[in-house]
Amino acid sequence: MLSVDIRSLDGRAVELEGSIDPEDAVWLDGDIRPSSPVTVHGRLSSAGEGRYYFAGDFRGTAIGECTRCLIEVSVRAGDSIQCLFVESGEDGLDDDPDVFLLDGKSSSIDLRPAVREGWLLAVPTFVLCREDCKGICPTCGVDRNTTACSCASDGDARWAALRERATEP
Ligand SMILES: [Zn+2]
Ligand SMILES: [Zn+2]
């Protein structure tokens, strides 16, 4: 469970373990969603009147696209999270990305939005299917990992043009 009843804390710390499904309502349109449940574990503790501190970590996998050859690649993402949940807005805290405001009417803390933010920062946006991926030939469009083409070995014609320009007087 990633939702905790504040009243059950009563000044103590609780160990938490749970996961967020790829279909969970916490994900928004445009998010890079996980391809399998993101597992979360950590410790939530009381940090003074109306304040709660969570420290833990999460990990999961996502489907990315190789930047060079565009095939789908499974990527792992994970990180640690530390965040503070506060019952009411305090000056200076609102701008802190690691501070989450608690709904005054609610008696529980939902960790999913904090995990979501951490996840979105942790998922790599630059993915390679393998370190030496040769990519797609910019001239004829073949996948150079599987097919050899006879285009100029000097690579991308656009780079060649740039190089020429750079050496002009
Ligand atoms: Zn690739
Ligand atoms: Zn080619």
Image (cartoon, rainbow, N blue to C red):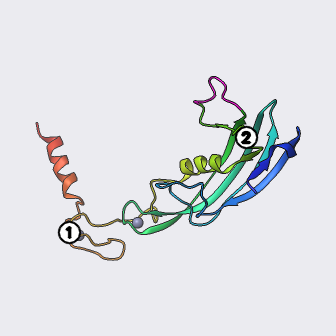
Earlier residue among tags 2 and 1: 2
Q: Does the stretch in magenta take in 149?
A: no
Q: Callout 1: few (<14), some (14-19), or many (20+) C-alpha neighbours within 10 Å?
A: few
Q: Secondary structure at mark 1?
A: loop
Determine the image quadrant of residue 60.
bottom right
The kind of residue tagged 1 is Cys
Q: Nearer the viewer, residue 92 or 121?
A: 92
Give the extent of the magenta segment: 88-95
Q: Which x, y percent locates residue 80?
A: 67, 47
Q: Which x, y percent locates residue 48?
A: 82, 30
- Residue bearing the label numbered 1: 151
Q: Is residue 132 left or right of residue 19?
A: left
Q: Which x, y percent locates residue 141?
A: 25, 69
Mark closer to the observer (2, 1): 2
The residue drawn where x is 63% and y is 48% is 113
Q: Does the stretch in magenta take in 94?
A: yes
Q: Is residue 16 left or right of residue 95?
A: right
Does the numbered disc 2 mark a residue whose Cβ is under 8 Å from ligand 1?
A: no
Q: Callout 2: few (<14), some (14-19), or many (20+) C-alpha neighbours within 10 Å?
A: few
The kind of residue tagged 2 is Lys
Q: Is residue 107 left or right of residue 25?
A: right
Quarter of the C terminus within the rendering? top left
Q: Secondary structure at mark 2?
A: loop
> For the image shown, how many numbered marks are present on the structure?
2
Task: Give residue 105's mark.
Answer: 2
Q: Predominant secondary structure in magenta?
A: loop
Does the numbered disc 1 mark a residue whose Cβ is under 8 Å from ligand 2?
A: yes
Q: Are marks 2 and 1 in contact (CB under 8 Å)?
A: no
